[in-house]
Amino acid sequence: MLSALLAWTLVAAPAASAPAASPAWERAVAAAREAVARGQLDARSKTPLAERARAAGLDASAIVRLLTDLVDACPADTCPGLAREDATAPLIRALAELGGPADAPILVRLAARHQYNAELALEQLLLRAMSEAVPKARCAPPTAAELAAARADLGDYAVIRLRDGRLRGEAPTAAELDDLAYFYASVAAAGPEVGAAVEARAGSPLKPGTADPERERLVAAMTAAESAGDLAGVARHGLAYLERLGYPGALDGSAEDTWAWGGARYSYVFRDLARAGELLGDHALADHLYRRADPGGGACGTSTSYRWEIQVRGAIRSAEHLGDCRLALPERLLDIDGARWSAPPVLEDYGPARLAAAGFDLPRLLRGAVLTAGRDREPAELRAALERAPAPLRTAALARLARRGPEAWERRVHAIEGLADIAGRAAIPVLSAMLPTSPPTERRRLLAALGALAERPIADPCDPDDHGFSGRGSSQWERPIGALGDRCDTSLRLPEAGRLALSLAPWLDDPDPETRQAAAEALGRIGHRAALPALRARRSDPYSPDDRRRCDDDDRCRRYFPVRDAVAEAIQTIRERSASDPAWRRHDPAPTAR
């Protein structure tokens, strides 16, 4: 919310003082606590929270009244009483289960007072509203006519591949052309990429623009509207603020005088205005603004992924309300919450199960998207690659580049990782075949995706007396890849893992040190002894970045050898995992009789 932005601007603001306790506050607290106790809303129970609330006579309107009384009696912008009040969070959680968009104003008011549970509840309400819109939205794979039109439009398309150390454009094979046509037909109606809009004359935290009193007044009015739960006011004042910067055209970013750690104030206004539009039913406005806001651009980029995820979810919800799932098909392919492996699949979340249920061939979609890899190179590098294409493709491909831009779909949908996740075992030969003709950046991602897909769990998932586990975390969003070893029926058995490890081991000798490091990490995750000889041969890898040192807890520093470290870790992991090889062999499936 915009109020949260103002609390984290680069210029600190004085904290608001807590209001004195009042009879109204005491009555509101007593009523809220009584309701929570009556419904056992703060207890752990097998009975769903919504069911407990209804049994206690607490419907959405009753909870809204209780929360409204609390907020009205605690009016300060940063009211410590709400945060300390143990009844607030259970009531918010119950409202998230029972309410709908019509109940959002009280949650907006609570979010403006820094109640994070209210932010989560708003997301839950919006997701439920989307689930009701999903059955009404058009969602179907491309028709034969659409496929024919897309195929005809790809006669000037060149796939970027590495040949003899140089990138060059090549005509797709017939099979590749089929996959490309399927992908292009499916994304023909897709909206703009989330967070990729370029505003006019970019500003920065180091070069803020000149203060504009009218903009300040409008921001204050928008903040007040949020505090009052006035969604129409948020929309009215937010649009007027943006118009001062040039909206609906490209904004004059250099005029913005307020920057937060996460970016320009106008980007926060975009997001708050998008959510207000969504809650008010203006889904076209919401879609436009969720896609246009810049999730970064500030002094600190650590929360960029978080803001981008918020915008992606909003774009998906808006598409369903606008009546066509294809508008957000690229965003669904990201599987942003990694819920595809749930049982049964969740069709009404933000992932690709919705597309699969509608009849889309997900592996084919991603095989087509993978063929656009390399088109996110620097403009001069991409043009040079196309200039190396054979005639007459060269002239046609350059003309297409001038007309349509780079068409960097692989980067947008994270197709390498997506294909690994969705196609599973069938992705291994496809991704492996791409390794020799991919430039180093994509090659490292291919190796990482193969390692994640084939990661060996601690114990055999086919052993009924044990449970395997493997997992990695990151502060930055990564396209999730479900490991084959998560389930017995998909796990790579030792002979398969050994063949894959041997096929990747030659990349330990690649001239690019980061590729060697990625290969070592992938082999460690696969966890097969077949890779040990090749790994041991790289234990003295010479690569060391000139400007990096590794220090221990005693501040003793040494030169950093990233490939050596990755090799040593891989060897250790393989030794640990391969200790269970005899147990794995005992649980191998019996050979099929011929």
Image (spheres, rainbow, N blue to C red):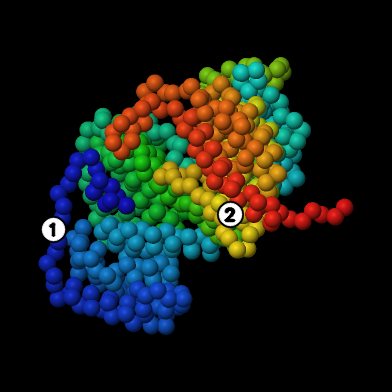
Residue 432 badge = none
What residue sits 49% from the left and 38% below the top?
A: 569
Q: Residues within 10 Å of mark 1 (few under 14, many from 20)?
A: few
Relative placement, left or right, of 572 versus 7 is: right
User: Taking 459 as reference, is 313 left or right?
Assistant: left
Q: Residue furthest right?
A: 594
Q: Three-letter amino acid code at disc 2?
A: Ala
Q: Residue 268: x percent and y percent? A: 34, 45
Residue drawn at x 24%, y 69% is 85
In the image, residue 181 sits, relative to residue 327, either above or below, namely above
Q: In this rendering, does residue 188 appear at all?
A: no
Where residue 65 sits in the image (x, y, percent)? 30, 74
Q: Residues within 10 Å of mark 2 (few under 14, many from 20)?
A: many
> Secondary structure under badge 1?
loop
Name the residue nearer the viewer: 316 or 377: 377
On residue 17, the disc is 1
Write down the residue under mark 2: 459
Mark closest to the chain's N terminus, 2 or 1: 1
Q: Where is residue 119? Give x, y as percent.
A: 36, 58
Give x and y (percent) for residue 241: 30, 44
